[in-house]
Image (tube, rainbow, N blue to C red):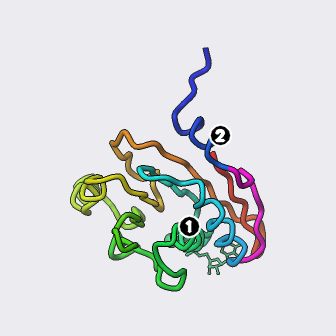
Amino acid sequence: MPFHSPVRSLSRSFVAVAEQVTTHSAEETSAWGREFAKQLQAPVLVLLSGDLGSGKTTLTKGIVAGLGAAEENDVTSPTYTLVHVYGKDRKVFHGDLYRIETFHDFETMGLEDVFDKPAILILEWSERFPLKTPWPAVRIQLEHAGGDSRRISVL
Ligand code: ADP
Ligand code: MG
């Protein structure tokens, strides 16, 4: 029997936008994020992976804007601050594990507060440390595809 992970079934049933797309500008990536956001319902993890500059933060701008939690321009990289929170009801979190070196760093970055109530957590470099939570997850991979092209795949 093949194993169907919750990630896969969630992405199959929730994602109405194309599951693999190549964008050709930052604007196209954030626009895809705004559309993608329409499928998201708290609680959910949006786990972003991809090299530096592949567009994780750019995509997050679109997702946060699509959720109506903030303007795109107000969404900035949480590389140093580790976690940003958006929305009047503080329901959209944006984290980045890039600078997290040790498991101790990971445990003390304040992510546990995120799980107090159903929320949407968008996480860059999520593959660096495994999150222990029963929340469903959608994984999105971003890849450089030459010049300003980026391949976005919902895994
Ligand atoms: P990451 O968070 O993955 O390190 P960023 O979103 O911070 O990446 O940076 C992506 C950079 O690439 C930005 O400077 C953006 O303007 C540029 N860029 C060029 N083309 C694209 C595209 N198609 N999608 C996303 N970003 C793009
Ligand atoms: Mg980033």
Q: Which residue is mark 2?
A: 12
Q: Is residue 141 left or right of residue 145?
A: left
Residue 17 within the segment the image draws in magenta: yes
Camera-side residue of 117 and 108: 117
Q: Is residue 63 left or right of residue 151?
A: left
- Kindly state the secondary structure of the residue where label 1 is placed: helix
Q: Tell me how many marks there are.
A: 2
Q: Which residues are magenta?
A: 16-25
Q: Is residue 5 left or right of residue 113?
A: right
- Give the quadrant of ligand 1: bottom right
Mark 2: few/some/many CA within 10 Å (<14, 14-19, 20+): some
Query: Quarter-wise, where is residue 30 in the image?
Result: bottom right
Query: Quarter-wise, where is residue 79 in the image?
Result: bottom left
- The answer to whether residue 95 is seen in the rendering is no
Vertical placement of 29 versus 120: above or below? Answer: below
Please tell me which residue is depicted at 24% across the width and 58% down the height of the picture.
113
Q: Position of residue 37 (x, y in %)?
A: 58, 61
Disc 1 residue type (three-letter) = Ile
Vertical placement of 80 versus 34: above or below? Answer: below
Q: Which residue is mark 1?
A: 63
Looking at marks 1 and 2 on the same chain, the residue that comes earlier in the sequence is marked by 2
